[in-house]
Image: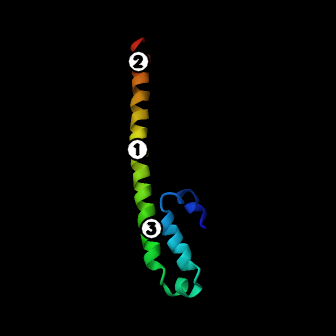
């Protein structure tokens, strides 16, 4: 199992399992027979990454707004 997939076990589990099962056959792995499974896994991982980035962006904007509000309140007393 690739280390970068260790935290994705829950999200894309079925795609990881399908790729692992395909890679069990060295011949299939070497001849490109697992490409479809790999593409599906990549799509799943990309979707998860985009969703995570979107959540992080929203959280960062909220934190930035709170920080700016705190700075405004701090400087109002000057």
Q: Are marks 2 and 1 in contact (CB under 8 Å)?
A: no
Looking at the image, which residue is at 50% across and 73% down? 18
Label 1: how many Cα within 10 Å (few below 14, some 14–19, many 20+): few
User: Residue furthest toward the top?
Assistant: 77
Look at the picture and state if 31 lies above or below 65. below
Q: Secondary structure at mark 3?
A: helix
Label 2: how many Cα within 10 Å (few below 14, some 14–19, many 20+): few
User: Residue tagged by mark 2?
Assistant: 73
Q: Are marks 2 and 3 in contact (CB under 8 Å)?
A: no
x and y percent of residue 3 in the render? 61, 62
x and y percent of residue 72 in the render? 39, 21
x and y percent of residue 17 in the render? 53, 70
Q: Secondary structure at mark 2?
A: helix
* Figure quadrant of the N terminus: bottom right
Give the number of the disc on residue 42: 3
Looking at the image, which residue is at 45% across and 67% down? 42
Label 3: how many Cα within 10 Å (few below 14, some 14–19, many 20+): some
User: Residue tagged by mark 1?
Assistant: 57
User: How far is mark 2 from mark 1, CA to CA?
Assistant: 24 Å
The answer to which of marks 1 and 3 sits earlier in the sequence is 3
Looking at the image, which residue is at 44% across and 28% down? 67
Q: Nearer the viewer, residue 9 or 56?
A: 9
The answer to which of marks 2 and 3 sits earlier in the sequence is 3
Please name which of the two marks, 2 or 1, marks the residue nearer to the observer: 1
Q: Secondary structure at mark 1?
A: helix
């Amino acid at each position: 199992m690739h280390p970068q997939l260790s935290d994705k076990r829950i999200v894309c589990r079925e795609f990881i399992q399908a790729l692992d099962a395909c890679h069990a056959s060295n011949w299939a792995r070497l001849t490109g027979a697992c490409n479809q499974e790999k593409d599906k896994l990549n799509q799943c991982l990309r979707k998860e990454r985009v969703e995570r980035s979107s959540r992080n962006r929203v959280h960062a904007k909220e934190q930035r707004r709170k920080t700016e509000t705190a700075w405004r309140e701090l400087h109002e007393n000057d």
